[in-house]
Amino acid sequence: HTFWGTSYSVMIICVLSLLWEGIRASAVWTVKIRVLNSRWRLLSYSTVFVTVQGLLGAISPFLCEYFLARKSGASFISGNQKELADATVASLAPFAVMQFVLQICSLPFMARDLG
């Protein structure tokens, strides 16, 4: 045991998984540079994407709770498992459908950019 109360093997696995995630992320960015064939285009697209993703991640708990209270009266602040399951489905399904539609709508732009 370490002074945090966990085993060394678990810490080693966590450190290795973080290392592998860093390698994977850098490989993904390298591929994006090669595919888009422009570091500036990648920088501009990625800056917008990361900014929007961060903002949506910050407001999503409040947005989901607001829509749940308005539509179904369910809440994530509950100990009832059925209510939590209903809240999860009710809050995620509309966003998943919206994301799918937006991805389909973006296909012509991606096809044009990729040649």
Image: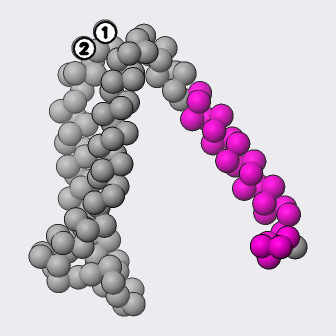
Can residue 77 be found in the magenta stretch? no
On the image, the x and y values in percent for residue 37 come to: 42, 10
- The region drawn magenta spans 2-27
Give residue 5's quadrant in the image.
Answer: bottom right
Q: Position of residue 25 (x, y in %)?
A: 57, 35
Specify the quadrant that holds the C terminus: top left
Q: Which labelled disc corresponds to residue 112? A: 2
Q: Amino acid at mark 1?
A: Gly
Of the residues shown, which amino acid type is indicated by label 2? Arg
Residue depicted at x 39% and y 21%: 42
Left or right: where 84 falls relative to 26: left
113 in relation to 53, above or below: above
Q: Is residue 82 visible?
A: no
Overall secondary structure of the magenta section: helix
Q: Residue at x 61, y 35 (%)?
A: 24
Q: Are marks 1 and 2 in contact (CB under 8 Å)?
A: yes
Q: Residue furthest left?
A: 70
Q: Secondary structure at mark 1?
A: loop
Task: Name the disc covering residue 18, or none.
Answer: none
Magenta span has 12? yes
Q: Secondary structure at mark 2?
A: helix
Q: Is residue 48 above or below residue 82?
A: above
Judged left or right of residue 82, residue 26 is: right
